[in-house]
Image (spheres, helix red, strand yellow):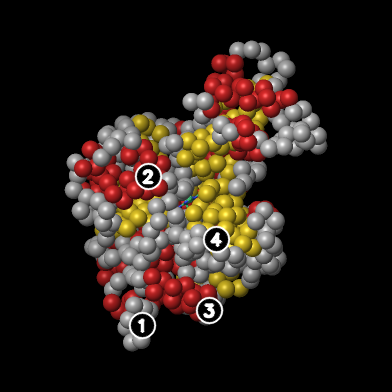
Amino acid sequence: MNEERPDIIDVDEWVREGSRSPIQTMAAYREHWARAEADPDGYWLAQAKQRVQWRKQPSYGLEGNFSSVRDSPIAWFGDGELNVTESCLDRHLETRADKTAILWEGDEPGDTRSLSYRELHEAVCRCANALRELGLEKGERAIIYMGMVPEAAIAMLACARLGAVHSVVFGGFSAEALRDRVRDCGASLIITQDVGKRGSKNIPLKQTTNAALEGEHGVRKVLVFQRDPSVEVEMKAGRDLWWHEAVDKASPSCEAVCCAAEDPLFILYTSGSTGRPKGLVHTCGGYLTWTAYTHAVTFDLREDDVYACVADVGWITGHSYIVYGPLCNGATSLMFESIPTYPEVDRYWDMVERHKISVFYTAPTAIRVLAAHGEGPVRKHDLSSLRVLGTVGEPIDPAAWRWYHEVVGQGRCAVVDTWWQTETGGHCITPIAPATPAKPGSATLPVPGIMPMMVDAEGAPQIGPAEGRLCIVYPWPGMARTVWGDHGRYVATYFDTFKSMYFTGDGARRDSDGYYWITGRVDDVLNISGHRMGTAEFESALIAIDEIAEAAVVGYPHPVKGQGVHAYAVLQPDAGDDLDAIGKHAHAAVREAIGAHARIDRLQFVPGLPKTRSGKCMRRILRKIAEGEPERLGDVSTLADPSVVEVIVEGAKPFTSR
Ligand code: PRX
């Protein structure tokens, strides 16, 4: 204990006293924040050494800065060496071998599996041995295209055990999207399963993999986990192997490959405002430090917690807060295969009661869907085990926040609205459960070490209460280091907009208490039910069909999904007038190019797009129309043909007047 400041628990004492978080009060938060700002190297080195198991401990923190990121990527703990699976598995064998590491709840309620740290360690070793047998080597890429089964986490960790780089592709993505990712990262191996299960439906993962690999020659092997033996799938001789044949017979011990702190751990594709999705690269040492720290501190993790993040491992939330952060912290991490409304709308609360979940982490969309069903389904269950409730992925409106706090949390649980991104690796602006006074709808204050900056459109810093664009001015260990195969794109996307700052792409407001309120993307990235998609991806799918000449896609506020997709399409002169058929074709094209989770909510055929005389589409105008605010279009006199706007406004009325 610090004699003068009893509220401050430092990292050494954190270990001695068996608690996971040194930040229990606002005073401790401020002290940690000040310490991380004054001496980031010292602060993060101490965290890295305490929370991560190293083969060779690092002797310094940061190399590089945001001004020189073009020529020398950011690096943390550069001389450290480790294998992340030793932090996530091996070291727990001494003290937590029989503790549940992964608690799995399948699609059908009560269909559960539980893997202790010992069992998970063995399973990962077996899988790593099988992958090695299939020729997967350090630095090679493997795509994981699976549903929410423990084997998905096992596959991720098995790649990491070998120093191979995994790239998990969300199971909702189409064959085309999967093929793009396979090609972009040059994957030599895919791990998939026969079918995924979601709400009693079969997701044809193997079939989609087969379609994606047609004519592709880079992928040597496909390892297939069998989820449902009653389903037949096509296996290609010489390329495809069953998990239960290759993995189950492999040895349960496997020496971990030693990696440098800055070796890539995984690539995760995410959508930007332009072009194809980019593969963000996270590295071993900094990412693990960041996810372990934030997982412990934000949620105030305790040894006996049953921690449940109901995200999918296909997104960054699943990577950081189902697999790496929780396992590094020796937590019991729940994996959920189904959806919140199957078989009934009380599924989450039924799980909370059965598993005695203490920390529950979900997305605002799910909360809005469930809140619409009222309090009844929640009240049916004993939720007294809950202590902390988290949200992530999109702004949470105060009404949904209050419902979560009062109805689910019964007014006694902390609600943590965690703001972060695929790029940031883990939480950046968030309440710290035991410490930060909440304000419904605000992500509150920066994590120690995160130095946010609000700027105006020209990049001028805004001091005090302000509204503007959200940037971060100093590197943190968990940030993505590059875009796979295209460092120039990484620099152009994040560091060219505002000099020497990381630009998040989000707008925000800072109030007089210094609290941040995220207002949403200021670029052309959509956030549909917490799924991130680029308008450019929709547009290129639309113009790829014969009938459509031009397309522009914008988001609009949607009461349940957060944002809906409004597509404006200009037909080819010879497209014909069967608009229903063209519409069906357009929807199918989007599903094929992106996946079933990408849906256009409103498709509007227009005679032309509002363009300037130099041919630039004025998306701002289209956004205002989709938002139902045609009276706030601003100046349209610079348009080549202002009359087109009136026609578009008229055509949008059936949508926006609802
Ligand atoms: O706009 C922000 C929104 O989600 C974006 C990041 O999306 P993705 O990389 O898919 O990661 C989602 C999971 C971390 C951000 O740019 N976002 C995320 N969390 C919040 C949020 N917006 C408001 N409040 C949040 N808590």
Q: Earlier in the sequence, mark 2 or mark 4?
A: 2
Residue at mark 4: 465
Q: Is residue 347 left or right of residue 310?
A: left
Residue at mark 2: 400
Mark 4 lies on a secondary structure that is loop
Q: Is residue 266 left or right of residue 435?
A: right
Q: Amino acid at mark 4?
A: Pro
Q: Amino acid at mark 1?
A: Arg
Q: Residues within 10 Å of mark 1 (few under 14, many from 20)?
A: few
Q: Earlier in the sequence, mark 4 or mark 3?
A: 3
Mark 2 vs mark 4, foreground winner is 4
- Where residue 396 appears, as percent x and y from the top left, is 43, 47
Does the rendering let one see residue 149?
Answer: no
Q: Which mark is residue 39?
A: 3
Q: Quadrant of residue 499?
A: bottom right
Q: Which mark is residue 462?
A: none
How far apart are labels 4 and 1 at the CA level?
A: 30 Å
Q: Amino acid at mark 3?
A: Asp
C-beta proximity under 8 Å, tags 4 and 1: no
> Height in image: 586 above or below 173?
above
How far apart are labels 3 and 2 at the CA level?
A: 38 Å
Q: Residues within 10 Å of mark 2 (few under 14, many from 20)?
A: many
Label 3 CB less than 8 angstroms from ligand 1: no
Mark 4 vs mark 1, foreground winner is 4
Q: Which residue is nearer to you in this view: 623 or 224? A: 623
Q: Earlier in the sequence, mark 3 or mark 1?
A: 1
Q: Amino acid at mark 2?
A: Ala
Label 4 CB less than 8 angstroms from ligand 1: no
Q: Is residue 151 left or right of residue 524?
A: left
Residue at mark 1: 5
Does the rendering let one see residue 453?
Answer: yes
C-beta proximity under 8 Å, tags 2 and 4: no
